[in-house]
């Protein structure tokens, strides 16, 4: 019995926490960005939470080369080996299935799926049930890309660096920060656009805001908090969510919020911090002009080279989807990568625009 107990305990795996899973997801995304063929799109979505049973993170990889027969192109074989190597290093067991245009890899830990990877080949469609098609454009113009820089409000030097860039970058300012009002006013004076980076509840435990929209709030409390935030960030013309993986999936909360935004004549951009979001659909239902981030986040990895590749993916995404919205932050590495890479947009026929031009 003693021997059995010892062996059983040694064989039993400790469940991964949501933070463990999200950290591995970042490793998957970083590895895929490095190993996937040039021009591929890589996007990770947080979906695994301690409080939600059988939840998992998602990694979508779009590879714009065709697959012939059952064999993988050598670059894709190396990509899969790279992903499986990361999984094995963390005690994950891969299960791979295939339908020709899409390869599915599920990674299990202690019998529970923690990560799902979809590898889409050229000509395949996005089969994720929570994915929206790219917004159609009827403007008769060429492809357009809007870049939103989040979390402004604390660092006036970072805001000045953004203002100094010769591009229509949309800033999204957090309320309750030292320089929130000052940065918003400076942006207006310069003719730049300002959005409210509206704090919302996340399913994760980290970085909880002192004041944020969350499920169970009364109509009066939601209205009061939104009005307070709008007073703290003057002159905003639109809103996107700060965090919000819990709030944007809450149908009741979103149905309370959207009429208030319409009353203030504000548009809404869904940052899509969760695959379960209903924010964009709810905005459309209530007649709020809206859009959503439809290319990967720019700076999940704060590395100039990695961010440069993400910007290239955003430009390529705009070329293919006609309208694209990307989101990053005013980190020094992000601003450096933007300076180096945004001149490429024109050579690809992509026009850089403010976020307001892509809502509908």
Image: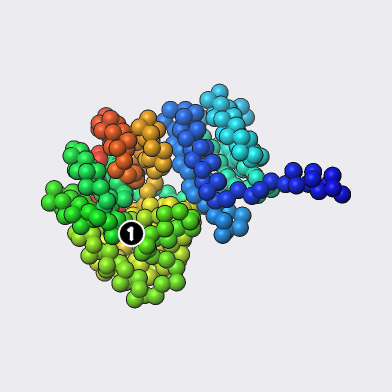
Q: Residue at x 36, y 56 (%)?
A: 241
Task: Farthest residue to the right: give it.
Answer: 1
For this view, does 155 lie left or right of residue 206? left
Task: Report which quarter residue 318 is drawn in.
Answer: top left
Which structural element holds mark 1?
strand
Q: Residue at x 22, y 54 (%)?
A: 179
Task: Farthest residue to the front: give it.
Answer: 2
**37 vs 69, nearest the viewer:** 37
Asked whether residue 195 appears in the rendered view, the answer is: no
**107 vs 118, nearest the viewer:** 107
Residue 94 on image: x %, y %: 64, 39
Q: Quadrant of the C terminus?
A: bottom left
For this view, does 30 lie left or right of residue 199? right
Task: Report which quarter residue 321 is drawn in.
Answer: top left
Q: Residue at x 26, y 61 (%)?
A: 266
Residue 308 on image: x %, y %: 35, 32
**282 vs 167, nearest the viewer:** 167
Task: Report which quarter residue 243 is drawn in.
Answer: bottom left
Residue 215 on image: x %, y %: 45, 68
How many numbered discs, if any? 1
Residue 319 on image: x %, y %: 34, 37
- Image coloring type: rainbow
**Disc 1 packing (10 Å; few <14; some 14–19; many ≥20):** many
Asked whether residue 33 appears in the rendered view, the answer is: yes
For this view, does 82 lie left or right of residue 226? right
Q: Which residue is mark 1?
A: 198
Q: Residue at x 48, y 52 (%)?
A: 275
């Amino acid at each position: 019995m003693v021997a059995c107990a010892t062996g059983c305990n040694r064989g039993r795996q400790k469940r991964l926490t949501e933070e463990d899973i999200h950290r591995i997801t970042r490793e998957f995304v970083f590895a895929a960005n490095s190993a996937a063929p040039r021009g591929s799109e890589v996007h990770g979505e947080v979906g695994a939470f301690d409080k939600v049973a059988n939840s998992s993170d998602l990694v979508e990889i779009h590879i714009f080369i065709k697959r012939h027969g059952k064999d993988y192109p050598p670059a894709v074989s190396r990509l899969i080996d790279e992903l499986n190597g990361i999984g094995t290093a963390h005690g994950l067991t891969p299960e791979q299935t295939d339908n020709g245009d899409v390869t599915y890899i599920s990674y299990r830990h202690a019998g529970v799926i923690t990560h799902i990877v979809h590898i889409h080949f050229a000509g395949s469609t996005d089969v994720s049930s929570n994915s929206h098609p790219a917004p159609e454009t009827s403007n008769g113009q060429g492809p357009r890309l809007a870049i939103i820089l989040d979390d402004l409000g604390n660092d006036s030097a970072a805001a000045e660096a953004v203002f100094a860039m010769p591009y229509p970058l949309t800033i999204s300012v957090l309320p309750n920060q030292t320089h929130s009002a000052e940065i918003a006013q400076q942006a207006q004076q310069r003719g730049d656009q300002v959005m409210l980076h509206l704090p919302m509840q996340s399913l994760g435990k980290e970085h909880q805001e002192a004041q944020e929209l969350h499920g169970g709030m009364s109509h009066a409390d939601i209205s009061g908090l939104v009005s307070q935030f709008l007073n703290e960030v003057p002159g905003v013309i639109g809103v996107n969510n700060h965090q919000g993986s819990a709030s944007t999936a809450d149908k009741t909360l979103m149905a309370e919020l959207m009429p208030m935004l319409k009353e203030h004549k504000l548009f809404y951009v869904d940052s899509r911090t969760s695959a379960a979001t209903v924010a964009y659909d709810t905005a459309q239902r209530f007649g709020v002009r809206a859009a959503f981030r439809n290319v990967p986040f720019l700076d999940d990895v704060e590395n100039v080279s990695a961010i440069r590749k993400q910007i290239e993916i955003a430009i390529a995404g705009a070329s293919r989807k006609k309208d694209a919205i990307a989101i990053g932050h005013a980190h020094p590495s992000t601003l450096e990568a933007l300076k180096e890479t945004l001149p490429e947009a024109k050579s690809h026929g992509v026009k850089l625009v403010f976020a307001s031009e892509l809502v509908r």
